[in-house]
Image (cartoon, rainbow, N blue to C red):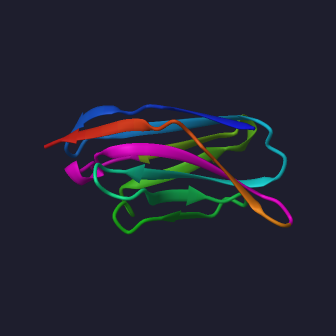
Amino acid sequence: QVQLVESGGGLVQSEGSLRLSCAASGNIFSRYDMGWYRQAPGKQRELVAVITWSGSTSYSDSVKGRFTIAKDNAKNTVHLQMSSLKSEDTAVYYCNLRQHFILYEDDSWGQGTQVIVSS
């Protein structure tokens, strides 16, 4: 079992910045990607950013140029630096770790951290 502990959420004013962190521990056996998803009230969970086991990154169009994802492999930690925040960034942010095994992939999720952007 993999445990993901998120931190760094909170209340911030529009155009402000926040940094989310997620520390992974437990049964990490294989190559893995780490990412951030978010879910706003009444909406489906959506991908925000992901960093693969090889270090490649990708972002949703809505955050491209404003958010940066980075990983500390030694600490199994991923960070999401969020800048120029907008009210539409308000959501619960979830950390994800996806392990790649030969025949399948395994997803683990954090408990979520709330981000509220006030206008």
On the image, the x and y values in percent for residue 113 come to 43, 35
On the image, the x and y values in percent for residue 116 come to 27, 38
The residue segment tinted magenta is 82-102
On the image, the x and y values in percent for residue 63 come to 36, 60
Q: Is residue 54 magenta?
A: no
Q: Residue at x 33, y 64 (%)?
A: 62
- Image position of 115 (left or right of 35): left
Q: Residue at x 25, y 35 (%)?
A: 12
Q: Quadrant of the N terminus?
A: top right
- Image position of 25 (left or right of 84): right
**Disc count in the image?**
0
Q: Is residue 86 magenta?
A: yes
On the image, the x and y values in percent for residue 3 come to 67, 34
- Image position of 109 (left or right of 76): left
Q: Quadrant of the C terminus?
A: top left
Would you place residue 94 above or below residue 9 in this image?
A: below
Q: Residue at x 43, y 31 (%)?
A: 8
Spot the residue most to the front: 42
**Viewer-nearest residue: 22 or 54:** 22
